[in-house]
Amino acid sequence: MKKYVYGNPLETGAVVREISESKTDISVFQLSETDEGLEFSCRMNENDVVYGLGEQVRGMNKRGFTYISYAADDPIHTENKHSLYGGHNFLILHRADPSVEASFGVFVDDPGKVVFDIGETKRDLLLIRTGKDCVVYVMEGGSLINLAKQFRELIGQSYIAPKWAFGYQQSRWGYKNADDVRSVVWNHRSRGIPLDAVYLDIDYMERYKDFTVDEERFPDFTGFVEEMKEQGIHLVPIIDAGVKIEKGYPVYEEGVRENYFCKEENGEDFVGAVWPGKVHFPDVLNEKARAWFGEKYRWLIAQGIDGFWNDMNEPAIFYSEKNLKKVLEEISSIQDDNLDLNDFFHMQEIVEGLCNHPQDYKSFYHDMNGQKVCHDRVHNLYGFYMTRAASEAFERIAPDERLLLFSRSSYIGMHRYGGIWTGDNESWWSHLLLSIQQMPSLNLCGILYTGSDLGGFGSDATEDLLLRWMAFAIFTPLMRNHSAAGTRMQEAYRFEAAESFRRLIRIRYGLLTYLYSEYMKAALSDTLYFRPLSFDYPEDAHAYLVEDQLMVGESLMIAPVYTQNAKGRYVYLPEEMLMVRMRSDKERTYQTLAGGHHYLDVALDEVVFFVKKNHMLPLAILEDDAKTTQDVSTDHLVWIGIADEKAEYVLYEDDGISKNYAPRSEWKTVCRKREELEN
Ligand code: MIG
């Protein structure tokens, strides 16, 4: 691995491994300087493939578009969007002909805006534009798997969630009080639908103030948390980045007094507006402020809370005080004008442009170890450091216990502190596919604990969409049904197919032993839980073209159905595999299929997956009344697989809650003879 340093880069915390700076010029790129920064470029050959970039739109192969790392609070994830919520500046350029050039991985450690033009402007040109100050790491030599692993070793071990966070989780922006939550739990329990967690969105707070609970909506919050625990339910409250400006609110007052908020150029606290109205942003890039903000989580943990989701930490700014003033003045100045279309559109533009305005991000400052740094330069670090604040506090507050933590915005390195969810997607079929495609890209960037809002956040979910999404989300570490206020309610029990949902969710619990084991192995050995097919079948040219199937852990491949009204789909098998068809944890059928293309029927209420040759996986047999991950026992495991003679599987097990992870020497290799396998 080579490390190249340009200008005077800031310490971002992305990397954990010490690497000495290379004295030679970067070899895989041509480098040129422009007025704004640096440009790294290289040619791509016709069949080369680009993987990576984490949370972005479009396919797993990133060729043919420009991706921009500049964390954006943009809820419309259409294919023309250049930025979503994170900045994940790692990619692998896979060379189709290694005898001509070697494949390589590159990580650009620059927390400001970075542009990746991957053959958009010129089809065969890869162009990366960075700021003047950055560090570039280049990994060379080796397979896709090896390049990915080198990078992961550079950035450190991924966050490990508690095992309960691998259960089914229910969320909705709109659960307003304790009774709403009780009803959600009751509706799952009374239908036998397993459930491990319910989320509290912004309405649990007192007027959107972080680290408060509205006492009218949740009288005796501690008692309520306890009541839920007794039912096996973990409550997961949201924390927003902005701190409400309100006299007498301790978080605000302390922050002002101690200079813990981001500042304007002139040293005054920067004022933006988000849910609570006007807010200040905690300067999480400042070590002291970070420790202070992290400590605030203690109050909720003391009440029994053991999981959090950090939101709006791009940070999202509905408007800044300054810019709003400017826009209002401009509008009042044209009050009596006869607006022609141009004037009208201009007015519309400035009003809409209030939200997340680029100028706002240039107008406030952080105090990084005494250095005043403009936010714009470190924009992509904000969500990372907010999450780091929480995680570092958890180390102090509950050093031996794993807490659930994930964030909306992130940067490379945040994967050590928490997971992410993929933000405000829509109940669109195209977003089911997008979610499938995002998973391996995120894993490449170290983000293993992740998933999308199951069923879609915005717009109305239909029953068939939710069924298909569920059949995919069974395999994502974060399996959370979440939706926006005002959309159709999409809890599993709202639909006629409630029984089908119950069965699908039980399949997740049946597979939990495998899914958890694979997650833990991926985290502890810096490997990938989700992979494009080409990672496992690098010699198969067709594997590089498959954009809608994934390898999941060491034994499985999935090929989810993601189009409406489909009765099945074409699936590509890189080799002979065992097709497993499940309608519930009990009803399962098998068929061995030859390598190649197949059209396969997949009913709406089925999960179909494929086991690699000479591999196997455990399926836990559940009791009829299984309610949570606690009810999944490994005493009765069925081993599913196909083998010439025998199949092996490395099974990882631990208590699921402490940080006493099992060392490699304790991972069990389970072996089954051909005739002992279920198939
Ligand atoms: O401006 O808290 O992505 O999951 O439900 C919307 C309300 C703020 C955005 C999050 C979404 C959450 C919503 N939040």
Image (tube, helix red, strand yellow):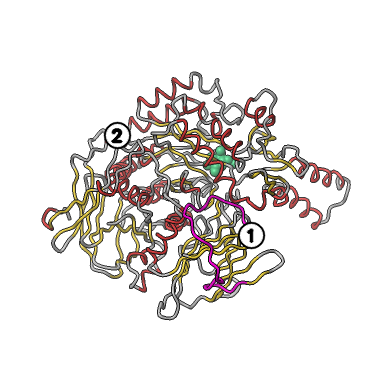
Circle number at residue 133: 1
Q: Residue 444, image x and y in percent?
A: 44, 58
Residue 496 lies within the magenta run: no
Q: Tell me the magenta residue range.
A: 7-31
- SS category of the residue bearing label 1: loop
Q: Quadrant of residue 383?
A: top right
Q: For this view, does 341 lie left or right of residue 168?
A: right
Q: Amino acid at mark 1?
A: Asp
Look at the image and tell me whether residue 282 can be seen. Answer: yes
User: The C terminus is located in which quarter?
Assistant: bottom left
Residue 15 lies within the magenta run: yes
Q: Residue 314, image x and y in percent?
A: 60, 46
Q: Amino acid at mark 2?
A: Gln
Q: Point out the tag, 1 or 2, that comes first from the N-terminus.
A: 1
Above or below, comparing residue 145 to residue 375 in the picture: below
Question: How much space separates mark 1 and mark 2, taking CA atoms?
Answer: 49 Å
